[in-house]
Image (spheres, rainbow, N blue to C red):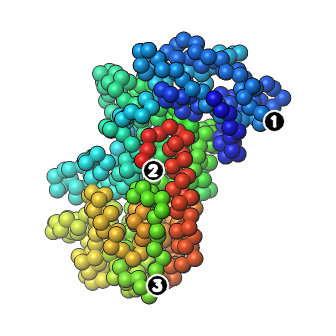
Amino acid sequence: MNAPVLNAEIAAAAVPAIKIVRATTNLLVVAVTRRPGAEWPALTVRLDGQDYATIRPAALVSGDAVEAELTIPLPQLPNGRPRSLAVLDAATGTLAPGSNLRPLKAGAKLRGLVIYPAGEVYQHDCVRWYRAPMEKLLADYFNIGDMIVYDSTLKLLDYVHLEPMKIMNPTEADIERYASDFDFAIVRGSNFIHETMEWFRAIEVLEKVKIPVYAIGVGAQASTRKSSIKLSDTSRRFWSIVADRSAAIGVRGAFSAETLRQNGIRNVEVVGCPTMFRTRNRDLKIRVPDQRDIRKVAFSLRREQDHTYTADPQAYLRNQKAALLKVDEQSDMVMSAHGEQEEKAFFLRDPAAKEKAVAEFVRTGWWSGPDDAVMRRIYEKQLFSFFEVESYDRFSQGLDLAVGYRVHGVLPAIAHGVPGVLVAYDTRSQELAETLNVPVVPEAALAEGGWRAVYQEGALNALAKTYAQSYDRMRIFLERNGAPHRM
């Protein structure tokens, strides 16, 4: 048994006096806080409802520390894996958050559930969009970035089987199977922290399925950091459950962390996004070529816009078109599209859908008219889109530079060693760039000067030098949570 003192970041997030950090069939890790002027609380450990041991931190922690972690070995039970494990304040009987969950089986192949998948899984950890008739693919908008995050998360985790958790219409049989056959659940990284998020019956399912829940790179969405996000009671309850069942909720940046804290969810840790680590190569070499050697540049498009993404949608579109045309002038450009219906019409080469798309482009001012020759050339000859994440991997490996408005147009390219520059148009792109040290520039900079104006070797060298540090932060987060991983 050991008792290391927690670092400042962990201590700041440790609100309960006692909290289970992680538990396996071999050991239990508990975070303990000593109140100012008070003694350390004694702990009672229970296995399957029976008292197993009383732990007195005062005998294990030296000095004037007020926070510590205790690692408690667990016995090999004659009947195998315990069904539940709990820790209580020995004096008051108060249960520590994270109690009464089934501990992970050490060294075993684990089975996981995913809350809100984004695509169908094939070949174990590869994701593609759901197969559908052509007319449905053309009619529906879906965010390919969510698909990339999902795929990237699966690339990091170690599991033998994964399936979606039913949260809309789960049956009692579903819930019973989840409780008996699965070891953990994940909340994939996405814009899940906002006022109108709908969790359907996820809370009901989780209250009955006593397994750890890991949130990896989730985030809040707003056009500016001045925006205040007040979560619904349901969302606060959902995030409280996740907070209780993990060492910390992994968020993509400081804005998302502060949003959760303002809504009463305290144990939060900034980890960035799994996408930049999808190749699982800590020693990745990010290329920083001389400008004169850059030829093929990907411009990631995001025409989707509303006031949750930008304070001025019209200016946003004007700047984006100007940037697109400037980058096209300066390089062998490919425009990557990530889910908008109109771009899919051109990518899938559907004549009727293309005609409707052009009408929409003209109506919004995205094209100067139906005969906009430059834009038509780009759409007909320089457009790339995809329905399988592997396709973007292959595409990005042939690039010299990735720039643009899509976080998940730039980050997966960086994961293959391609330099990338993000446009800062909302809190998401800004906070991820800050967390991961990715160069980020104002909209006007790319619009006025193209990629040559924003390509700064110093900033890209900083990204390259700190990549391993960012990688380690994600790996340590997973390890601290007890999440099975392959990093």
Tell me the residue at 47%/84% (across/down).
Answer: 290
Q: Nearer the viewer, mark 3 or mark 1?
A: 1
Instruction: Name the spot of residue 358 as percent of width and height, x first.
Output: 26, 71
| 199 to 151, vertically: above or below | above
**Few, some or many residues within 10 Å of mark 1 (<14, 14–19, 20+):** few
| 471 to 375, vertically: above or below | above
| 189 to 366, vertically: above or below | above
| 404 to 155, vertically: above or below | below
Residue 8 shows in this picture: yes
Q: Which residue type carries mark 2?
A: Met
What residue is shown with label 2?
487
What residue is shown with label 3?
291
Q: Which residue type carries mark 3?
A: Gln
Tell me the residue at 19%/50% (across/down).
Answer: 132
Determine the image quadrant of residue 279. bottom left
Of marks 3 and 1, which one's residue comes earlier in the chain? 1
Determine the image quadrant of residue 5. top right
Instruction: Name the spot of residue 73 as percent of width and height, x first.
Output: 57, 26
What residue is shown with label 1?
64
